[in-house]
Image (cartoon, rainbow, N blue to C red):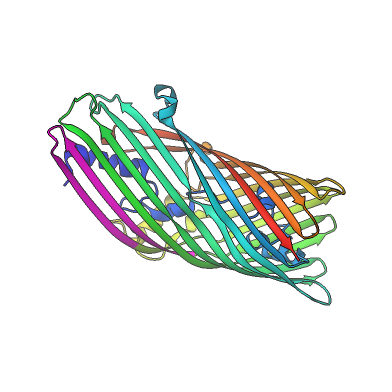
Amino acid sequence: MFTGKGKKLYYLFVLFFLPFFSQPSQAQEEIFSLGMQLGAGARAIAMGGAYSSLGGDYSATIWNPATLADVKRIEVYGSMSHLMRKNDTALLNNRAFFSKSARENDANFTKFNDFGVAYPVPTIQGSLVFAFGYNRVKSFDSNFDFRAFNQTSDDLVNQAWKEIENGGLNVWNLSGAVDVSPNVSVGATLNFWTGGSDFESTFREVDIDDNYTFDSYTVENGLNTDISGFNAKLGAVYRAGIMRFAATMATPVTFKVKEDWTFKENLTFDDLSFSDSTDAGFFEYKIKSPFTFTGGASLNLLNFVFSGDVEYNDWTQIRYKTEPPIDGISQTEANRSIQDNYRATTRIHLGAEFTLPLTGVSFRAGYFRDPSILQDRPIDEDKQFLSAGVGFLLDRQVKLDVAFVHGFWKKFNSGLPETTDVDRYVEDVKVNKLFLSLAFRL
């Protein structure tokens, strides 16, 4: 059993700092809201993900398989990324009260993103293209580190919270596209989803002024998540002179989630005696995503390309397909809670590209807005991304694309139990991510 203070701090940690932790107090539908989903391919990402009507390379397997029909030569494609993530945390929305070094935390993550092959089949007329490969489409990589002296009258101690997470959602895909008329192409992708995350967190407080009978208190949590699933994506593109129009539909994914969690607690007293406890567990459940619908258009005007996409998801249709990993809550109650607290969203993608004549060099820029899936949330919680990039046609066979993305959003948390002594915190997140893509065409 926890001591009075230990129990209070345990609930502070679980409710305040573990939004993805899988102990019974947590709802795992947050798998759909956590992380960043920027897509695949440096060209597409540099254009804000406004790519459903463009394509023409292997990354079309993610955006719109129909645009694979524009691939005219065998292509071997690969990409990597480097993420620089920074957060600035404030209690009670008061950053001035804490030193900058105690509020801010930086972390870097370098990952392999994509590898695939696109193969156009020789035809008498039209186009027939197949592709297969691997894409890392969503990143769960994150960091959090906050240290301060708690001046609340009941908690005159040094406190520190730290967490780190590595992981993401990946797809192995098999795609195909065909021209059904001179101006219309259709395509389909079969996606086999894999992925997960490794999450570690620590809360520690130290009685440096010797106000209490304890010396230090530490809670450590670990969570290893494994995710798998399957779905399909259908797409079409219509070419009308300098305009192109596209539409896609992704079927729901029923994710099978396996989670191993651990919990360790240690309370050391002034007389060097101590009390500790450990716990561990395993959950397995299934949760289903909604349909995803995307519409896009692009304008090719001389050396300029302008494009835009809108993506619609009705998150109220998330459903647990088995009992949820939440003690005391049935499958029906959990699904009803999702309907009451989630909403439909429209993601907006805008992009532009300019190609210097006779050089094979292209300059790109874009914007992407990813709204919060929760109802009644501040607009500052919407993730926003500004992007830019450049592409080089090194020769007839090799193409190099570079993209840089700057993202920013806030995370507001409130309504915690009064016993936590913390009723609100604000996390100001800023990310910079670099993508490099290389295509070798035969």
Question: Is 261 on the left or on the right of 112, as rendered?
Answer: left
**Is 313 within the magenta?**
no
Instruction: Locate residue 206, reporting x and y percent.
Output: 25, 31
Write down the region rendered in magenta: 254-283
Q: Nearer the viewer, residue 53 or 75?
A: 75
Question: Is 276 on the left or on the right of 143, as rendered?
Answer: left
The quarter of the displayed image where residue 326 is located: bottom left
**Is 266 within the magenta?**
yes
Q: Does residue 245 appear in this view?
A: yes
Numbered label tally:
0
Q: Nearer the viewer, residue 326 or 140?
A: 140
Question: Is 41 on the left or on the right of 306, as rendered?
Answer: left
In the figure, 48 relative to 174: above or below?
A: above
Considering every residue shown, the one lying at the far top of the view is 96
Instruction: Locate residue 239, reporting x and y percent.
Output: 80, 61
Instruction: Locate residue 296, reporting x and y percent.
Output: 70, 54
| Residue in the image at 25% along x and 48% along y | 264
Quadrant where the image shows the C terminus:
bottom right
Question: Is 320 on the left or on the right of 49, as rendered?
Answer: left
Q: Nearer the viewer, residue 295 or 41?
A: 41
Instruction: Locate residue 275, reporting x and y percent.
Output: 16, 43
Magenta-drawn stretch, dominant element (helix, strand or loop): strand
In the figure, 1 relative to 397: above or below?
A: above
| Residue in the image at 60% along x and 53% along y | 80
The quarter of the displayed image where residue 9 is located: top left
In the figure, 85 relative to 44: above or below?
A: above
Q: Does residue 309 appear in this view?
A: no
